[in-house]
Each structure stands twice: as C-alpha cells, then as structure tokens.
Amino acid sequence: MSDRNLRNVRRLNVLAAVALGAVVASGECQAGGFALREQSAAGQGASFAGAAAPGDSPSAMFWNPAAITAFDGVTIEADHSLILPRSSLSVDPSISSLAGFGFGNGGDVGIDAYVPSFYGTWQVNDEVYLGLSVNSPFGLATHSETPWVGQSEHLRAKVRSVAVTPTVGYRINDMISVGVGATTQYMSVSLSRMPVLASSPLTFGTGTIEGEDWSFGATAGLTLTPMEGTEIGFGYRSPMIVSLDGSMLVTSGGAAVSSVETTAGITLPETVTLGLRQAINDRFTLLAGLEWTNWSRLGTVPVVASSGATVSTLAFEYGDGWMVSLGGEYDFSDQLTLRAGAGYEWSPVKDAHRSMRLPDADRLWLSAGASYEFSSALSLDFAYTHIFVSDAPVSVATDAAIGVIGYGGTAEADIDIISAALRYKFGG
C-alpha cells in the first residue's frame, strides 16, 4: 500500500473514532416510530427526497451503500442535527380517572436532542470503494411531569442506539454500481412509570424496566445511471434481532418492592428506500423519494424474568411505516446550491395503541436547505425542517393487574429540526 493510501486510512480511522464518541454521547429524540431519519443535512433540506441517490453528500450511504462509488479520492463528512419536539395531551376527563383528583396533563413530553453522524469514503481504484458510517438509527425520549393523569402508564422513556457500518462498493460500469455493508449496533432502553401499588389509600410506586444489547445487520444497495442527468438509488437495511437483557425494579418511598432480572426480545424493522435525481436543465434537479419500514414486525413484546415468568408486556402492535417526498435543487451559482422539499409520512402507530410514551401520528414535512462550497475541497450543508404532526387520539385502558389507571384525550405535536454538515475531500 502506498504512503498516500496509508495516510488516507489513518485519517478515516481517527475521524471514525471521534465520530463514534460523539454519537455515543448524544441525546435521544422523538421520531416517526422510534427510528431516526435525521442522518443527513443535505437530504433533510429536501425532506429526504432522493436521499438514496448519491448527489454530492456521502450521507446517501446510510440509505444506499452503493452511493459511495460516486465519490473520488477520500471524502469525509460530519452531520449534526438539533431536534426540537413539542407534544402535549389535551385531557379527556371522561376517560381519565385521575383528572377529577387534580392530576394534570404531564406538560410537554418532548425532549430536545442533538444527533450527530459521520461518513467517510475512500476510492481504492476505479472499481472498488470503501466506506464507513457511524449513526444513531433509533432513538426516543419522552418525559411527563407528575402528578399527571397517565403517570401509572408513563413517566419517562429512553431509547438510544449507535451503529457502525463498514461498506464496500463496486462500480460495474458507468451505469451500474452495487454496495453492501455490515452493521454492528448497540441499543439501550429505559422505560419508567408509577404503577398503583394500593387503591385505598391510593399509593403509587416507581417501576423501571431497563435493558441493553448488541445486534448485527446488513445493508445493500444499487445505483443506476441509465442516462446523463438521471440517478436512481435503491437501498435496503436489514432487520436486527435485539435481546434487551436488564432488570425490572419497583420501589415505593425509596425502598425496593421487587427487583428481577429480565429480557425482552425485539426484532427491529427492515427498511427499503428508493431515490431519484433527475436533472431538468443545467441548474435544476428534481428529487423524489419513497421509503417503507416494516414496523408491523413489532407486535406485543413480553418482558420475561429469569424464572421464565412474563412480568410485563410492551404492546406496540404497529403497522407498516411509509414516507413519500418530492423536492428540488437549484444551482444558484458555482458555489451555492439551494434546495427545498415536502414529504408525507404515515405513522406506524395505530390509534388503539397510542400513548404519551410515544404520541406519534401522521406527519407533513416542509424543508429548505442550502450547500455552499468554500473551495473544491470544503463545503457546508444547512437545513431547516418544520414537521406538522396530526392531532391524534390517545386512549389507555385501566389494567388493575399491572397497576395502570386509564387515561386519554388528544395528542397535539409539532417538531423543528435544524441540521448542518461539514464535508471535506482529499484528492480525487
């Protein structure tokens, strides 16, 4: 290996280590289902229309690993997203038993979050390309302020993940490229609530379920360039089996009531993404995207103690998730590219199973962004998105067996996202 290639490999190794530390240290956030789409500032600027087609950002490899064949030399990119969710419950007293005792609505359950990601690509020769990405594909954080009508079902929810995906791409010819990747992911989950321990007088405890696990998956993709100005990207992210080993602890007045070791097996969904970039003229490019996520894999997940007994259940019962988006890029000058887009996302969360732990619903994305090239090597991406989340019903039934007092109403939410990315190219 030449001295130049050795330097390129060292650069990628150092930058990957820094990026991994940043993702591990990041906060959690609220997202459609509990997947995080916020992996690219360039993609977000058009509501992720065309995200699986290469474009100018190596972040396309998150959706389509074959996208790395579009980048000569060595390219590195660091993306940063700040997500600002707002979500609250308009309480229906007729189905919220604790409302008559002065319990509130829990306030704004959304928690602001910072989500970073990292991408690196290296052209080995005219046909072979290597890549590396570090992401947080899944995340969630909600918190309700007590005393509130649903505290026996939800107090705080946290999901954190970090995934590292080395990737290999192969350029078959000028029209066809393929790519594959192997993903290693760490995930941790913490869910807490205040179950009813006694009804007379009404006594609440604090129950927490925690678990963590490493899992493995794969990505695959295809990029087609059937004619000049047309790029089609197709990407697949495999399901991942997670066995969340941890514990369930119930306390009252600071003293432990019960504590058991637990495990919960969850199969995280696969995702299929299709992206199109079509040049209309020398300055304007049309972008389009379609994504399907197999959230229906998540039914009701039993939380099982080491004795084999089921001590709790997590009733997801999701449907499939879909998102369609349309956008465009306009080369305002040799240095400045403007973009915008809109998308509509059908939430996998069904009305019958929505709670304030994850008050997700169908959503409309409106985005705008820009890229500025300081030089042939250095460029900056910026994006802003506002998401209008549909008002949606919440209805959690009373379950005396696990100490849940029913509540409900209407969940109202919206989200702002601000993203930026810095990209640098070596050689090429």
Image: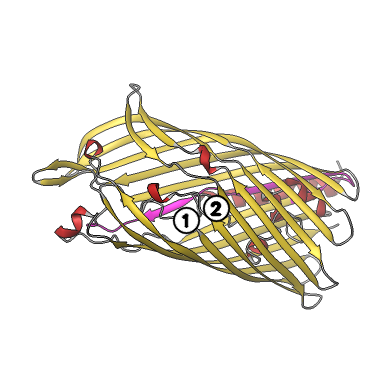
> According to the image, label 1 marks what residue?
29
Q: Nearer the viewer, residue 174 or 215?
A: 174
The quadrant in which the C terminus is found is bottom right
> Residue, x 74% and y 44% (percent of image)?
221
Position of 313 with respect to 122 (left or right) is: left
The image's colouring method is: secondary structure
Specify whether residue 373 is in view: no
Q: Is residue 133 magenta?
A: yes
Is disc 2 placed on a helix, strand or loop?
Answer: loop
* Quarter assignment of residue 105: bottom left
Q: Which residues are magenta?
A: 121-148
Element at label 1 = loop
Is 316 placed left or right of 169 in the picture?
Answer: left
Q: Tag 2: Cα neighbours inside 10 Å, few (<14), some, or many (≥20)? A: some
Residue 58 picture location, percent across and down: 73, 55
Question: Which of marks 1 and 2 precedes in the sequence?
Answer: 1
Spot the residue most to the bottom: 333
Which residue shows up at 58% across the image and 52% down it? 322
Q: Is disc 2 in contact with disc 1, using a CB cutoff of under 8 Å?
A: yes
- Residue 79, percent across and down? 62, 60
Q: Which residue is mark 2?
A: 36
Looking at the image, which residue sits at the far top? Answer: 307
Residue at the left extreme?
201
